[in-house]
Structure formats: structure tokens, C-alpha cells
Image: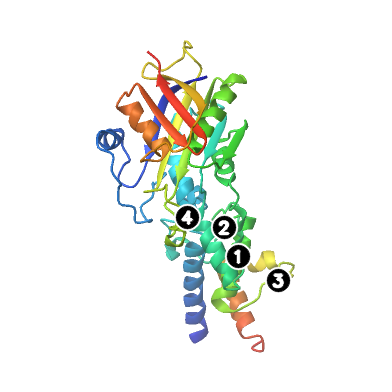
Amino acid sequence: MNAVIDQASLEQDIARLIIDTLNLEDLQPGDIPPDQPLFRDGLGLDSVDALELALALQKRYGIRVESDAKNAREHFATVANLAAYVASQQAPCAD
Amino acid sequence: MTAIRVDAWRAWAPGLDTPDAWHDWAMAPRVVPDDGQVQPACAFLPPMQRRRLSRLARMTLEAAWPLCGDDEQLPFVFASRHGETTRTFALLGDIADGQPLSPTQFGLSVHNAIAGQWSILRGQRGESTAIAGEADTFEHAMLEGALLLDAGAPAALVVVAEERPPAAYAPWIEDVPFSYAVALRLGRQASAGSAPGGAGWQLRHARADGDRARCAWPHALDFLRATITREPSLEHAWKTRQWIWQRQA
């Protein structure tokens, strides 16, 4: 149960980070559903946003996102994916 | 001697965002408070397109936007003596702290970034120029605009924009009393399409003989003041250069 709450609050946290980092005025975390695609036809982010976001995740959560990381596209696809990715990187021995 | 016709103007500064406010300012020029936070809304752009606009870019776009028709392609001159001092200072701070640089901030840290954003956001595919000169950057920008007309452009946009720099620059930057953007639409001389409210000017350059008084206001703001108050002439001196503006009847 705690894992579900943690995932939800991490998602909220990441949505806020996206809004603040990318300067998306007028948006609230609730406006970015966890499963909405962040790029292109979804929220409309682009490759520069991805770089910016990787840097922000690095600063905020102390994780390192290698630009050639496998599955980076997948990890960055949605807020939910990002939350799962951050959680897995923060606790690498948990799986 | 260069003939320059100003068909329309728009300007923005903190608290000065309507023609009436600028009219009042021109009658009694004063330093307006600038807390570095107030910025134009640029409501003509959806939020996703506003997200990478700096305050200086917003000022530029807010002033210039309506001066270009949706179906027009106009050459664009962006002029700023100091450019993105706020962004530069933040990037330098990151470097000093050993922090990685923001890709967005770094990518937009070149002087022609705002001209590029204008081009993208307005679908402008023509010439654009980004100028940084000295205190007479305004005159150089107007000269550039006049040359674009001379080369065949039907009209040209010239925007001079300065942002009040971070306090650390205070010992070196003394000619930005407050943030401002002045946008001028230049047109061809006495053409059939000339706006009725337009103003014709002659710009003459002479060698200044030394200790001429500097203008109390940034040249672009002083030119705007003279435009509004219909002053017949004005002179701006900087170092060895004297710029003489004469209004045409």
C-alpha cells in the first residue's frame, strides 16, 4: 500500500518538477496525468526539454541519466514511467 | 544623409504598456520602477510556445508582434547593447559553482537567439540581423533598417531592447535605467502604402569633437519621446560619433 502512495506522490513531485523546470506557466501537476505522453502529441515536449529534464532529475534525485542510456525514450515517455525509473535508480538493489 | 520613415511604433517597459502611458512618459520622462519581475504577458502565444522566452525576448515580442501582419514577411533587426545579462550571469554562476549548464539557457545564450525565436514563432523566413553596439546601438540599428529598405524590402522591423542587468554589473552598465523595448516599423519614403501617422526623419552622422553631453536617456527611448512630442530634431553624441535627427515636414 505504501508503495502505491509513494508512487503517486513521486509522480506528483515529478509533474511539479516538469512544470517548474520547463517553465510551463498556467499548468498544475494535476494537469499532467501520469499516463499522458510527455513528448510530441501528448504534452508537446521536445528533445531540448528532454535534456533539461534529465538535468533536473539528476539534481533533484541524485540519479544519473546517461544520454545513451538504453530505454531512455521509454523512461521519459510519461510521468508514471519517470517515477518508476527514478524509484528504480534510487534503490538499485530493491529489485 | 539617410532618410528613415517610421510608420508605426510600439514600446514596453514596466508599467508602460499602452500608447497613453508612453505619451505621459514622453511629456515627463522619468525612471520607472523595475523590480526585474514584471514582464509582458505575450498572450498572443500559447503557454507551450512561451516557455523558452526570456524576459528580454518577451519584451521584444510584445513590442514587435502587432507591427508585422500575419501574411507579411519583413526583415527583422534586433538590437541590444547588453543582451541577456540576466541569463549570462546565471550561467556564469553555474560555471563558478561547478554546476552543469541548462541546455535551454546555454542554447539561447547567443545574441541572435531572440531574432531566431521571432523567426520561428512568426514563420519569418527572411533576413534578420542581431546587433550589439555601444550607447548608440539604436542609431546603428536604424541604419541597418534603412539599408534593408534600400536593398528592396517593402518595410522593416527594428527592435531595440535592454533589460536592467543584475546588480553585479552596476559598475559597468549605466545606460539601462529600466528595462525597455522599442519596436519601430520602417517604411519606404512617401510610398502609397505609407501610414498616415508615420513620421519621416533624416539621419545625419558627423564626427563629434569630443566633450558633447551624453543623452540623459537611452537613445531609443529619447527617439520615441521626440516622436511622440513631435520634436523637430534631436542629437545623440557618443564618443567620436554624433547622430543628428531631423524631422521632415
Residue lying at the far bottom of the rendered structure? A93
Q: Does mark 2 fall on the same chain as mark 4? A: yes
Name the chain under label 1: B
Q: Secondary structure at mark 2?
A: helix
Q: Which residue is mark 2?
A: B105
Q: Disc 4 designates what residue?
A: B172
Amino acid of disc 1: Leu
Q: Chain of mark 3?
A: A
Residue B111 % position (x, y): 58, 47
Q: Is A11 displayed left or right of A86 in the figure?
A: left
Contact? badges 2 and 1 (CB < 8 Å): yes
Local secondary structure at mark 3: loop
Label 3, label 1: how far apart the Cα atoms are:
16 Å
Q: Chain of mark 4?
A: B
**Is A8 in front, or is B65?**
B65
- Determine whether the residue tagged by mark 1 lies in a helix, strand or loop: loop
Residue B53 has which mark?
none
Image x and y of residue B203, in percent:
48, 23
Vertical side of B128 occupied by A39: above or below: below
Disc 1: which residue: B101
* Color style of the picture: rainbow
Q: Specify few, some or many for label 4: CA neighbours under 10 Å numbering under 14, 14-19, or 20 or more.
A: few
Have a look at marks 2 and 1 and say if they share a chain.
yes
Pair 3/4: label in front: 4
Between disc 3 and disc 1, the foreground one is 1
User: Mark 3 belongs to which amino acid?
Assistant: Glu
